[in-house]
Amino acid sequence: MHPHYRRNIFDDRQGYGIVSRTLHWLMAALFAWQFAGALVHLLAPQSGARQLFWPTHTTVGFSLLLLVLLRGAWGLANARRRPQQASRRLGRAAAIGHLAIYALMVAVPVLALVRTYGGGRAFSYFGLTIFSATGNRVPELMAPGNALHGPLGWTLFALILGHVAMSFVHRFAWKEDVIGPMTRGRRQALAEG
């Protein structure tokens, strides 16, 4: 493979390759849709906007689960090549924050799937049957999703907002280009002041 294409596909110390960036921004767009729908569902349950967003909630949620699994595998494959934090302490904090986000990106949709199965309902994804309806309700399978899907989803929303806020703190307050590697694929020297 030509080095230019390899650099553009895979992550390296200077930035993220096209695969990582595409997965990141595709997921960002889907999360924006998902959380906008959840907010409308909560704040305006009788609105036309709810009718636009809410019917897609399950499909978008499962899409996000598939994408986070793919993104996690890709991230592990690129782990030794990825850009590093300048500060060891900040690097550890960023790693913990990212780990929490990833854990919730898996847990929230899995809880919903287990709840659906426990409710005896079928689940299909774009016409592909993931599991068939059993008609049997299993309260023990439904309880974790009923109790945790919403609260953990809102926790994920808060962590994502924190992630976005910290990217701007790095960029504008600390003059560290953490946005460039995820947008352009490369770091850029920032002017002081």
Image: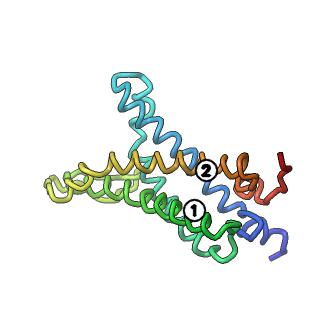
Q: Residue at x 36, y 52 (%)?
A: 124
User: Gap in Å between the C-alphas at discs 2 and 1?
Assistant: 9 Å
The disc, 2 or 1, on the residue closer to the chain's N-terminal end is 1
Q: Residue at x 57, y 62 (%)?
A: 94
Amino acid type assigned to the residue bearing label 2 in the image: Met
Examine the rendered structure and indicate whether residue 39 appears above or below residue 174: above
View extreme (top): residue: 47
Q: Quadrant of the N terminus?
A: bottom right
Q: Residue at x 35, y 32 (%)?
A: 42
Examine the rendered structure and indicate whether residue 166 appears above or below residue 70: above
Assign a secondary structure to mark 2: helix
How busy is the neighbourhood of tag 2: few (under 14 within 10 Å), some, or many (20 plus)?
A: some
**Percent x, y for residue 150?**
33, 46
Residue contact at pointers 2 and 1, CB within 8 angstroms: yes
**Percent x, y for residue 27?**
56, 51
Quadrant of residue 87 within the rendered picture: bottom right
The residue lying toward the viewer, choosing from 17 and 62, is 17
Q: To which residue does mark 1 refer?
A: 94
Res. 116 in view? no
Quadrant of residue 73 within the rendered picture: bottom right
Q: How many marks?
A: 2
The residue lying toward the viewer, choosing from 13 and 77, is 13
Amino acid type assigned to the residue bearing label 1 in the image: Ala
Q: To which residue does mark 2 refer?
A: 166
Assign a secondary structure to mark 1: helix
**Percent x, y for residue 43?**
37, 27
Res. 81 in view? yes
The residue lying toward the viewer, choosing from 128 and 55, is 55
